[in-house]
Image (spheres, rainbow, N blue to C red):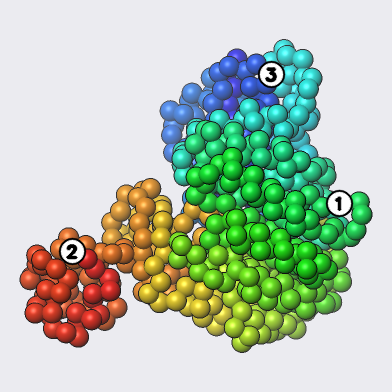
Amino acid sequence: MKLAILDGYVDEPSCLGVPPYIAPYPRYIWGMLKHLGADTCRYVTIDAFRADAELQSKLSEFDLLIVIAGAVVPGKYLGGMPLAKTELARVAVAKQNILVGPITLELTDRDRAAEALQKFVIFELPFEERLYELLGKILHAPAIGYDLNRFALLGAEVVKQHPDYPFVICEMETYRGCYWSNCSFCIERFQQRWTRSPENVLAEFEHLYAHGARYFRLGRQTDFLTYMADFNKECPPKPEPEKMRGFHEAIWRMCPNIKTLHLDNINPKTIAAYPEESREVLKTIVQFQTAGNVAVFGIEAADEQVIKANTLATLPEEVLFAVELVNELGKERGANGMPKFLPGLNFVVGLKGETKETFDKNYEFLRGLLDRGLLLRRINIRQVKILPGTPMAEFGYKNLRRHKKQFKVFKRRVREEIDREMLRRVIPFGTVIKDLRCEVQKGKIAFARQLGSYPILVGVAGEYGRNRFLDAKVTDYGMRSITGIEYPLELNKARMYQLEAIPGIGSRTAAKIVRYRPFESVEGLKGAVGEEVYIKVKEFVFV
């Protein structure tokens, strides 16, 4: 039989699978197919499918297509565009089609009744065990020995089929479900609670590493600090510093040449409840994970009325304490030019209990962090996405409609008055950011990012091919991105517009530099353009 996995990408509160990330789901499913004896298998992404009519035709000849999708925490993406509900009819091309992932939570009765969806067998979350049983029947293999940990090892090889390989960040699952919070909008309630032992996670690290993976994020959990904690003993669970240290040491012992090791979610409630234990785990993270790391805190709102109405986890003063502690331990700059470990904040607009004053409270909280000199790597502001089965479903989008104007004003104020100044502090002018991967070329600007968790987007003057790696010196700031120049810039080969991008160098001076080339040394600029220009240029170039 000919079988294929179509990765439509996922973006959930605790899981990211949009390129350059690959989520655990396709790896688990690939492992299931291998375990059941499937031989002719293929993995494709939705972007490759959209762009290749020949590929679409080939997949129509396949016996089975498993589609994974669901960007239920939508954002702006550079690496790929997730599959939308409206595209489902287009991708159901095989003789038999299966749909899995968070996208199934978005389907209404009307969607399910549509002719296009009749082409799919649909499995809602958690889908893995039921999918495995069906695959056993399709492949005429006994579906015994269901074990996601085993499937993770067998499926590790699929990363080599990812279009971005070897520049793929493997999202690593440690546990699933939220054990002690019940936020009104969150889909973690639909996940079956499941914790993986460190031995199983480490074995998956080892297998992925053997297949060439070098970039990892411990992202598939709601609070990394509570991994390996006793969820039955305390609420919130107490972090385990010694276990965490041993876990990190084992990762590096097995995989000594990892290039990125980051995490995603941390619940600030845990830090506030267990400051000493959390401090020790955070020290381990700073020591053993790579620079540019981000701990995302889900504050959602700084308004206690909203917090209570939506059973949110954390109070503003607890978030402030957590931000202060992570700053204390992680703000030192690492070898790649970025601070080693900083917090990020998520705000959600449109929740129950929200008023016009909520936006003022959110802004004042952020303003207070800036005034205290605290650093945030990112501030994410999104409108709530309401899914059937959540407590928000009955309430609906009333507040989004009611506060449309306030949302726009709040978001603009944060971007203009907080974000840009925060960027200047996090990545000061002249900082050299290393190992930027060029992804998109637009005119004379290449857009590049480091491979890691919530990397800063850098617009680099110059024309570079995709997957070219370079270092860049920071020259200017947008609201959520920065601009820079390749560092060091080769003086005798730089294009004129690249020289013009050096602060203080206009078109006339750039033309003069070009006219006097080649230079035997950077000091040769003095005689050509004078001492003042030489001082401006020398920090950016080499011969």
Report whether 273 appears left or right of 287.
right
- Closest to the observer, 505 or 381: 505
Badge 1 crowding class, 10 Å Cα cut-off, few under 14, some 14 to 19, many 20 or more, is some
Q: Label 1 amino acid? A: Asp
Q: Is residue 498 above or below residue 290?
A: below
Picture coordinates of residue 124 (x, y %)? 77, 39
Q: Label 3 amino acid? A: Leu
Q: Name the residue at 28% across, 60% down.
A: 462
Q: Is residue 163 above or below residue 482?
A: above
Q: Name the residue at 76% across, 41% down.
A: 196
Residue topped by disc 2: 543
Eye-nearest disc, 3 or 1:
1
Eye-nearest disc, 3 or 2:
2
Residue topped by disc 1: 230
Within the image, what quadrant is residue 524 found in? bottom left
Asked whether the residues under the numbered discs 3 and 1 touch, taking CB atoms below 8 Å apart as contact, a structural biologist would say: no
Q: How much space separates mark 3 and mark 2, taking CA atoms?
A: 59 Å
Q: Name the residue at 74% across, 26% down.
A: 132
Report whether 425 appears left or right of 512.
right
Residue topped by disc 3: 36
| Residue 468 visible | yes
For mark 3, give the secondary structure. Answer: loop
Asked whether the residues under the numbered discs 3 and 2 touch, taking CB atoms below 8 Å apart as contact, a structural biologist would say: no
